[in-house]
């Protein structure tokens, strides 16, 4: 069974630009969660989607948005990039959204210059 | 507002000895706690979990202890092996919350 894939793996953008990250969950998984990992802050929860509906979101500004498609693939968009958005963005998929059933992808490393 | 705290950024242990990683939480709504392990260039992988109705859960060399009154949990690794060297994240969730709150992580070094 293929694991969670994230594209691209690395991305360099400049301040003010926008970026879209993609996550393909494990086949059959309907829940996708997104996290931001920065040094010293650990993994910060961004949002969770289940069957194309956002069920929960973390405390991030509106510049961070996401969506999920009917095939469970998910995208995350960040508009008007800031230097502080530089981080590793991880997505995790699970069948129902249970924390102990989450499988993480390798992440997308975003660098904002 | 850090609801899950791992106050030790790093820990160094000799091979064969016990590693103890600690975690504190503030939200009494949390009813499920987890530990994840992360190697460089990989996503975190689930290691072990514990429900709030238990105070201990064991899986091979890994044991998680939960002290609800102190809002504290710990992960014990016995015996520690060099392959255990990784970043360990403590996490918490609550029923129906559909989100997992992670701590900042503790980097474990196991010296051969």
Image (tube, helix red, strand yellow):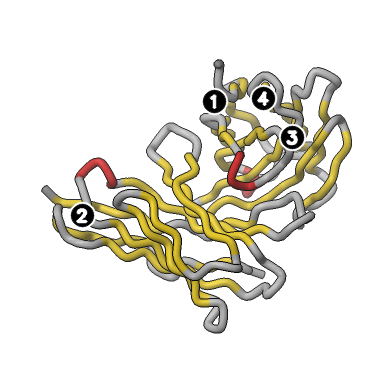
Where residue B78 sits, quadrant-wise, is: bottom left
> Which mark is on residue B79?
2
Marks 3 and 1: in contact by CB < 8 Å?
A: no
- What is the chain identity of the residue bearing mark 2? B
Q: Is residue B5 left or right of residue A73?
A: left
Q: Residues within 10 Å of mark 1 (few under 14, many from 20)?
A: few
Upstream in the sequence, badge 3 or badge 4? 4
* Quarter that holds the N terminus of chain A: top right
Question: What residue appears at the point 63 percent right and 47 percent down from the top-left corner?
Answer: A99
> Across the whole image, how many numbered discs are drawn on residues?
4
**In this orientation, does residue A113 appear?**
no
Q: In percent of the image, x 72 and y 47: which residue is there?
A: A46
Q: Which residue is mark 4?
A: A25
Residue denoted by label 1: A10
Camera-side residue of A78 and B81: B81
- Do callouts 4 and 1 mark residues in contact (Cβ within 8 Å)? no
Of all chains, the one bearing label 4 is A
How far is mark 4 from mark 1, CA to CA? 19 Å
């Amino acid at each position: 069974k293929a694991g969670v894939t994230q594209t691209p793996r690395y991305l360099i953008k400049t301040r003010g630009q926008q970026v879209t990250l993609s996550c393909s969950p494990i086949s059959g998984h309907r829940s996708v969660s997104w996290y931001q990992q920065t040094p010293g802050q650990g993994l910060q929860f961004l949002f969770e989607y289940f069957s194309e509906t956002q069920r929960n979101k973390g405390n991030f500004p509106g510049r961070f948005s996401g969506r999920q498609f009917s095939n469970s693939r998910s995208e995350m968009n960040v508009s008007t990039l800031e230097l502080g958005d530089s981080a590793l963005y991880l997505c995790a998929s699970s069948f129902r959204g249970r924390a102990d059933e989450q499988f993480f992808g390798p992440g997308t490393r975003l660098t904002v210059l | 507002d850090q609801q899950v705290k791992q106050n030790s950024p790093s820990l160094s242990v000799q091979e064969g000895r016990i590693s103890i990683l600690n975690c504190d939480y503030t939200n009494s709504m949390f009813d499920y706690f987890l530990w994840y392990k992360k190697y460089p260039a990989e996503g975190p992988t689930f290691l072990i979990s514990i429900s709030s109705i238990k105070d201990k859960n064991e899986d091979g060399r890994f044991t998680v202890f939960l002290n609800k009154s102190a809002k504290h949990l710990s992960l014990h690794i016995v015996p520690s092996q060099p392959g255990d060297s990784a970043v360990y994240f403590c996490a918490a969730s609550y029923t129906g919350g559909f989100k997992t709150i992670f701590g900042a992580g503790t980097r474990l070094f196991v010296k051969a």
